[in-house]
Image (cartoon, grey):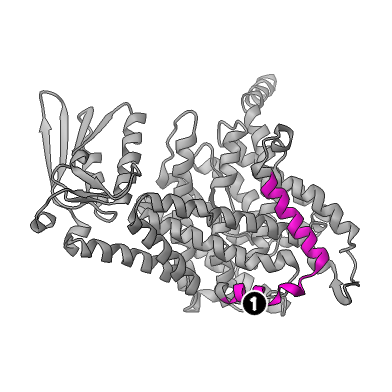
Amino acid sequence: MRAFHFKLTHWVKSHRSDFISGGLVFLIALPLCLGISLASGYPAVSGIITAGVGGVLTSFLSNSPLTIKGPAAGLIVIALGCVTDFGFSQGANLAGDFAAYRMALAVGVVAGSLQILLGLLKLGFITELFPFSVIHGMLAAIGFIIMFKQIPVALGLDLSGPPLELALKMVKNITSLNPEIATIGVLSLLILVGCSKTKIKWIKRVPAPMLVLLISVPLAHYFDLEHEHTYSWHHQVYHLSPKFLVTLPKNILGALVLPDFSAIRDPRCLQWIILFAVIGSIESLVSVQAIDLLDPQKRKTDRNRDLLAIGIANTVVAFLGGLPMISEIVRSRANIDNGARTSVSNGFHGFCLLFFVALFPTLLHRIPLSALAAMLIFTGYRLASPSHFKAIFKTGWDQLMIFVVTILATLATDLLVGLGLGIATKFILHSLRGIPPHRLIKPKMEVAFDIENHLFTVKPQSALVFLNWLSVKKQISKLDRGEKVVLDLSSCPMVDHTVMERIHELSHDFDMNNRKLEVTGLDGMIPSSNHPFSSRRKRKFKQDRYV
């Protein structure tokens, strides 16, 4: 018994920084989980179930040491589209809304199972099938949609509709906003913006979402949102009621809901299964990759294992009534900044969420929806920030074109069409540059081995683009015998932006494994911009060099 107590005490001490970080991330995650759930058309508690149960599960299943798992703003558009397709109408018919929610849970179970399959088949490279400009365009479009959907909630406007139509409605109906609700929403947004800009140390130590709650909850109590009543402002009457506050069950066990698997027979569910599985996997793997680069210990996540872990967790939480989950980059970054060292912080943040909701549901009921909407508006702005447009433009006008096409197509239609048109634009640009269609899939290349110097040389003979890069990477990955690999691009007529990024990532992976990847031949190419990862083409080349 003493030996067990000693080991437990030692374990707790060794993970002290993880517990501290997990507790601080919990303060950030709590309001965001509630807001993401409601914006997705799910009950508020579903996001807590996801981050709680999913966070604890993935801390054991994944080898990603620093990522925080949970619901993310990037999946709001898919989740809301799914429940809306099944009949969700934002409270107009509570029975219908609940039925749509249960059907969406069934979609979540199947999508999670598909992610498990992707992990078992070792398809963690799925992110490399998409150009960076298309992925960033998709995320920016999601940011715009989140802002368009949440601004009415923050201002107390009763509006709905597709993103672009909703934007026009807001302009026409802005004078109909509810002053007291808008006060909470605008003040919350100002706090978030102010916290992101301030250099005052004691303010930066307090998680901005928690600071919003510390101010908005008393303000909601002052406006008496707990009771239904009316008030007058400039000769106009406005209504207030508990509908402007978060609604939670008094017992978390009462929030557990089983999926309605009759939805699987509905042809509409196929689209949402694919979107949840593919888009969720891409977002999660991109986040894991970004966080690995920030890891002070330079550890590398097994993407296939992490995808498997996400799939298992998504399947379990969907069975319990939770939202789909991914590796969330903002909370993961906060986890690193707060000193986390292992996945214990992810598990502890999940435990704290479940513990708090189980013991203090009444406190959460006092949170105003407009404050949560402000948090999501701020998140949406960060996804679609002007700085992203500027960064993409620096990589070249062609990347900006693909980025903008993806955004506009997504806003006008949906995510699948937006992704498809973004990739199609990339293909068209490459075709106009004279690259034959078959070389977009499989490039020509030569491989040589210098036995005396233990040196491998991989020399592509055709243009390198986002889709055929996997063939080159696969060839390089086979070369385990030599310590040094040379990627000779001197015979390559063109290298696109995505491949330049991928080469940089691969070089980083080599460095972490104490190996050397030397890239040659770029000096003879013209970059499309001053950005180090911009696309490049030969100064002079014959048309048949692309063949």
Q: Quadrant of the C terminus?
A: bottom left
- Residue 106 in the image: x percent, y percent? 56, 68
Left/right of residue 448 with respect to residue 286 in the rendered view: left
Q: Position of residue 128 (x, y in %)?
A: 34, 52
Left or right: residue 98 versus residue 532 is right
> Tag 1's secondary structure?
helix
Residue kind at label 1, given as amino acid type: Lys
Q: Is residue 291 above or below residue 436?
A: above
Residue placed under numbered mark 1 in the picture: 169
Front in this rendered view, residue 333 or 350? 333
**Among the 4 quarters of the image, the one containing residue 371:** bottom right
Between 522 and 365, the residue placed more toward the observer is: 522
Give the image location of residue 35, x and y in percent: 68, 58
Q: Residue at x 64, y 77 (%)?
A: 169
Q: Main secondary structure of the magenta part?
A: helix
Residue 181 located within the stretch drawn in magenta: yes
Mark 1: few/some/many CA within 10 Å (<14, 14-19, 20+): some
Q: Quarter of the image holding residue 505?
A: top left
Q: Is residue 284 left or right of residue 123?
A: right
Q: Residue at x 79, y 58 (%)?
A: 184
Above or below, comparing residue 407 to residue 490 in the picture: below
Q: Residue 435 occupies which quadrant of the picture?
A: bottom left
Q: Is residue 268 left or right of residue 6?
A: left
Highlighted range, magenta: 165-194
Q: Quadrant of the N terminus?
A: top right
